[in-house]
Amino acid sequence: MSRRLVNITLDNLGDLPLSCRSCVFWELDPVSKSRAEANDPALEKESWISSVLLEWGSCGKILYVDGVPAAYVLFAPPQYVPRSVAFPTSPVSADAVLLMTARVLSEFSGGGLGRMLIQGMAKDLTRRGVRAIEAFGDKQWTAPACVLPVDYLLAVGFKTVRPHHRNPRLRMELRTALTWREDVEVALERLLGSMTPDRVLLRPSPAAVSGRV
């Protein structure tokens, strides 16, 4: 079984599940979301992805299993995520990137893909100098939704920083100590060992090394 983790781009955005491809829960404030849903929410999603890619960089990853899209994760600095301010435990810390949502398709559940997604995101953001990832959890989660279950976030390494009966805010430190980062690298190599395309994508190109664009 081959597993490949790649950045979300406009070219592979269509590989997201249809319900997620046209969902703008995080990307728009509630009023704008209602307007978008009455028109073309998929176009709004594409516009959001394009804007964040141009202004900040990679904001999501898709995990393929044997060439089939199996899971994905979306993340961005809180200033790009209007919905984040609507939560009772907001705001997200200024030094953190917000984990918006993640999903593993039901037919691929139970294979550890959710943990691999989060660790792949953590590796990417650590290399980009981000200090932490934060997320709003749902204590009453019962089915796949835009807000992740608290139990899942705790299981993959997050800790609660602002409690709430429904939507606590959780945080994962990315640069607490050099030894932690080394341990993460060892774990990632073990978990993502077959994902060589991802490692190739993360290498700087010869043009970047020489200073050419």
Image: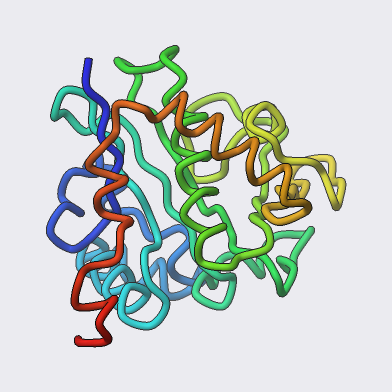
- For this orientation, the residue located farthest to the front is 210
Q: Looking at this view, is 32 or 176 the one in front? A: 176
**Image vertical order of residue 73 relative to residue 208, above or below:** above
**Image vertical order of residue 110 relative to residue 151, above or below:** above
Q: Where is residue 162 in the image (x, y as percent from the top left)?
A: 86, 52
Residue at point 66%, 70% (across, down): 85
Q: Residue 45's quadrant in the figure?
A: bottom left
- For this orientation, the residue located farthest to the bottom is 212
Quadrant containing the N terminus in the rendered view:
top left
Q: Position of residue 161 (x, y in %)?
A: 85, 51
Q: Residue 189's quadrant in the figure?
A: top left
Total labels: the figure holds 0
Question: Is 127 on the left-hand or right-hand side of 18?
Answer: right
Q: Where is residue 207 in the image (x, y as percent from the top left)?
A: 19, 78
Question: Is 174 on the left-hand or right-hand side of 19?
Answer: right
Residue at point 25%, 49% (across, down): 200
Question: Is 75 on the left-hand or right-hand side of 54?
Answer: right
Residue at point 28%, 29% (across, down): 70
**Image vertical order of residue 144 relative to residue 40, above or below:** above
